[in-house]
Image (spheres, rainbow, N blue to C red):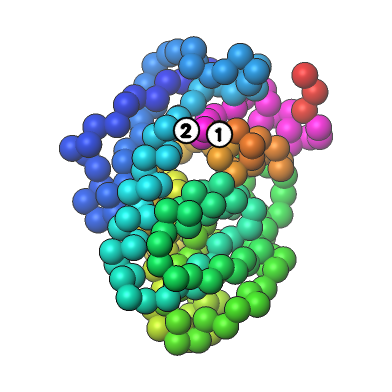
């Protein structure tokens, strides 16, 4: 499989969220750094594109929450890089907490949802920004939103780096979306496959044989 990303066309941005569209066309994995070429089939979103878009998202959030103090609730573990870049660009007063949510299974299909870490900061009467890495079927987001709403915040806004609209199974959308992407299982910039590849500075797609091997056990190269 060879994949290439097409550059963003600003005119086709999502009107509601401002998300930049990412499309995958024909060939050329040429830009994948040598170090990762055996494992990574293609870069979907470069580190530079991410930096520009995340800074835009921060500015939008700042405008929408002017004069408020935020509680940022981030879902472990895939949000690490996105969260760090997003909040360093926010000059609002904010407090940060994490919720652990795992969909068990080492593959690319989400399984049963388990909460592995609860909030420590109270969100009652607060403005909450819920941050996740990717909105896929929407099961995680809708479960977490239900849980947060029960804690009676003043308002909740949702923010995701990536959105795979094609896979949605629950009626949930995010208020802030970095990029709308096609239905590929992606890794990098915090996102894992079987707990690996979170450290890639870009968002990319692995070679099919890596996905196939990773489901079984450690990937050997
Ligand atoms: P959902 O519950 O919306 O189906 O999935 C959300 C969670 O599944 C995300 O928080 C993420 O952990 C995981 N996920 C969904 N799609 C992808 C993907 O393409 N790559 C990676 N690494 N994780 C994904
Ligand atoms: Mg996740």
Q: According to the image, label 1 marks what residue?
A: 201
Q: At 73% from the left edge and 33% from the top edge, which residue is drawn?
A: 214
Point out residue 22 in the picture as x, y percentages from the top left corner.
Answer: 36, 34
Q: Secondary structure at mark 2?
A: helix
Of residue 108 and residue 58, the one placed in the foreground of this image is: 58
Q: At 63% from the left edge and 21% from the top edge, which residue is drawn?
A: 36
Of residue 212 and residue 90, the one placed in the foreground of this image is: 90
In the rendered image, the vertical position of residue 159 relative to residue 49, given as above or below:
below
Of residue 165 and residue 163, the one placed in the foreground of this image is: 163
Q: Quadrant of ligand 2?
A: bottom right
Span colored in magenta? 202-218
Q: At 29% from the left edge and 67% from the top edge, which residue is drawn?
A: 64
Side of 163 relative to 56 (left or right)? right
In the rendered image, the vertical position of residue 20 relative to residue 169, given as above or below:
above
Can I make out residue 134 in this image?
no
Is label 1 in contact with label 2 (beta carbons under 8 Å)?
yes
In the rendered image, the vertical position of residue 137 relative to residue 4, given as above or below:
below
Point out residue 157 in the picture as x, y percentages from the top left corner.
Answer: 39, 68
Can you tell which mark lies on residue 64?
A: none
Q: Secondary structure at mark 1?
A: loop
Q: According to the image, label 2 marks what residue?
A: 47
Magenta highlight on residue 152: no
Can I make out residue 100 in this image?
yes
């Amino acid at each position: 499989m060879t994949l290439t990303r097409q550059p963003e066309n600003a005119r086709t941005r999502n009107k509601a969220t401002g998300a930049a569209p990412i499309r995958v066309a024909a060939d050329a994995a040429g830009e994948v750094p040598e170090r990762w070429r055996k494992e990574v089939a293609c870069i979907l979103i470069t580190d530079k594109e991410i930096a520009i878009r995340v800074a835009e998202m921060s500015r939008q959030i700042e405008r929408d929450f002017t004069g408020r103090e935020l509680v940022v609730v981030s879902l472990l573990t895939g949000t690490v890089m996105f969260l760090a870049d997003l909040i360093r660009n926010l000059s609002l007063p904010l407090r940060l907490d994490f919720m652990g949510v795992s969909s068990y299974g080492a593959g690319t299909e989400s399984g049963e949802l388990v909460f592995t870490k609860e909030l420590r900061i109270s969100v009652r009467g607060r403005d909450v920004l819920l941050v996740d890495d990717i909105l896929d079927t929407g099961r995680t987001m809708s479960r977490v939103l239900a849980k947060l709403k029960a804690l009676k915040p003043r308002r909740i806004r949702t923010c995701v780096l990536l959105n795979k609209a094609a896979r949605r199974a629950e009626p949930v959308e995010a208020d802030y979306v970095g990029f709308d992407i096609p239905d590929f299982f992606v890794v990098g910039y915090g996102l894992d496959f079987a707990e690996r590849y979170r450290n890639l500075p870009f968002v990319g797609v692995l070679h099919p044989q890596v996905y196939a091997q990773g489901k079984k056990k450690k990937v050997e190269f």
